[in-house]
Image: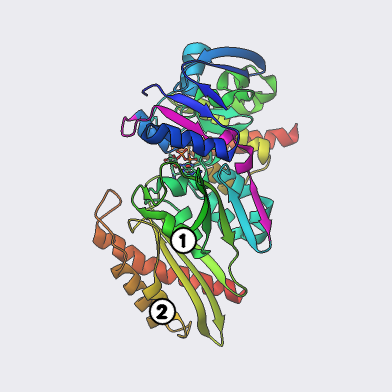
Amino acid sequence: MVQINQKITVAFNVNGGDVEIDVTPETALVDMLRDGLLLKGAKRSCDMQVCGACTVLVDGLPVSACTVPAFEVRGKSVTTIEGVAADDRMAGLTDAFIDNAAIQCGFCTPGMVLAAKSLLDRNPHPSEDEIKDYMRGNICRCTGYKKIVEAIQEAAQKAVQG
Amino acid sequence: MRPFRLYEPTTINETVATLSELGDDGKLYAGGTELLLAMKTGLLQYDGLVNVKTVPELEGVSYSNGTLTIGARATHSTVEHSADVLAHAPLIASVEHRVANVRVRNVGTVVGNLCFAEPHSDPGALLLLYEAEVDIASPSGTRSVSVEQLVVGPYETSLAGDELVTRVRVPLLPNGMRGAYLKFGYHHRPTLGVGAAVSVTDGKFLDVRLTLGSAPPKPTRMRDAEAVLRGAAVDDPAVAIEAGRIAAEGCDAIDDLHGSAEYKRHLVQVFVQRALAEAVERGVK
Ligand SMILES: Cc1cc2nc3c(=O)[nH]c(=O)nc-3n(C[C@H](O)[C@H](O)[C@H](O)COP(=O)(O)OP(=O)(O)OC[C@H]3O[C@@H](n4cnc5c(N)ncnc54)[C@H](O)[C@@H]3O)c2cc1C
């Protein structure tokens, strides 16, 4: 059995690059990303896994980085919004958010885009109901969601057209 | 959050030995979706957390001989997407799909949900419908109890500090029984969950199971309400109304953020009738 008292080395892949960083067991993933690696896209907001502003993907699945401990990503791949922004293959999705004005203040946008990416990776042609169902755990206080749903629909459509 | 030490055992024996050594200073940690929230606010404090996710034996969902087995490491998402669950108990997959949001389902476990015993939860009332049991390991051996006996009240289980739930065993509903589960609420956690399973012959209820969650202090089997249904005509609305009334009266609802006790009793009355109707309809199809 391993016992970790104060320091744990987290070796993982973030946005395609391998990194290694020492954290304490109680360090949340969002703090390791923001303070340790200066990836500020994920935001601590409600701090109770309700709002989705801290969403990142771990091995492709969305989690709340405000509560998931940093040590959980040892040996895993983490995708943050910075990784999406730098990935040309994701331009269809991010452009769709911009073209549809699915952004106002932008605070929820990184989480929205990452959740949408995870949905489309699994289900490239979601219905409107499937989009709403998957995205219901990401809260936006400005846009009223309609434009976000439309952006995801457009991204799915454009991906089909190539 | 106050600093804690992390223990990563690799066997069940190591896990319970560590728990026993730590005593009140230690706690099992699965997904942490409940535990870490309570620790962040300072409501709970532990010096050591014991990770169940490093124990391979606790993994997975499987099916054999009419029983689904959900390991302690299985997340809501694992259960929701499990081919065995979809094939043998699609109702469980559909209820699991409606638990929390996708991020919590990717991390939180079914067993962790049962063991935290937060009243506003779905798995308890759902698994009571199946008369599910949990297997428990401790330094002195193993035992099994029903989910009904596991949860004793709000945030309270019958587990000792050095006990680990290794799996939930879910027997499929008996032949001819069809189940339904309805949940209701406007908060991120449910205000009410009602489970109904029925078998029908010659237009009469042959067997009935009725369960309530979230409104009562713990997931509850409504046996008095079941009793008035057995043998009664399925198309007699008065019988379902009477079952709903008995369930509402017996549900021990309290006033809280989800509404007044009176409001919850009203919900119970209405949703018991709806759940029964849905279970009957599924049986007919
Ligand atoms: C935003 C949000 C929405 C939610 N919505 C819903 C909902 O709609 N319906 C619903 O049912 N639930 C809901 N939940 C609750 C969710 O289902 C639970 O948080 C989750 O399942 C708990 O599992 P965990 O693995 O994270 O448990 P942990 O937080 O790791 O542990 C919880 C407790 O169980 C103990 N424990 C864990 N594993 C074991 C074991 N193997 N043996 C003995 N004890 C153990 C721990 O020591 C701890 O006390 C919601 C939660 C959140 C945060």
Q: Is residue B113 left or right of residue B265?
A: right
Circle 2: element type:
helix
At 57% from the left edge and 22% from the top edge, which residue is drawn? A80
Tell me if residue B48 is in the magenta stretch.
Answer: yes
Q: CA distance from mark 2 to mark 1?
A: 21 Å
For disc 2, the marked residue is B227
Amino acid found under the numbered disc labelled 1: Leu
Q: Which residues are magenta?
A: B41-64
Amino acid found under the numbered disc labelled 2: Ala
Tell me if residue B51 is in the magenta stretch.
Answer: yes
The chain ID associated with circle 1 is B
Query: Count the marks: how many?
Result: 2
Image region (quadrant) for ligand 1: top left
Q: Quadrant of the N terminus of chain B?
A: top left
Compared with B145, B111 (above or below) is: above
Q: How many residues crowd mark 2 within 10 Å: few (<14), some (14–19), many (20+)? A: some
Residue B212 visible, this angle: yes
Q: Given the current orientation, which residue lies at the most extreme bottom position?
A: B202
The chain ID associated with circle 2 is B
Q: Quadrant of the C terminus of chain B?
A: bottom right
Q: Earlier in the sequence, mark 2 or mark 1?
A: 1
Compared with B96, B21 (above or below) is: above
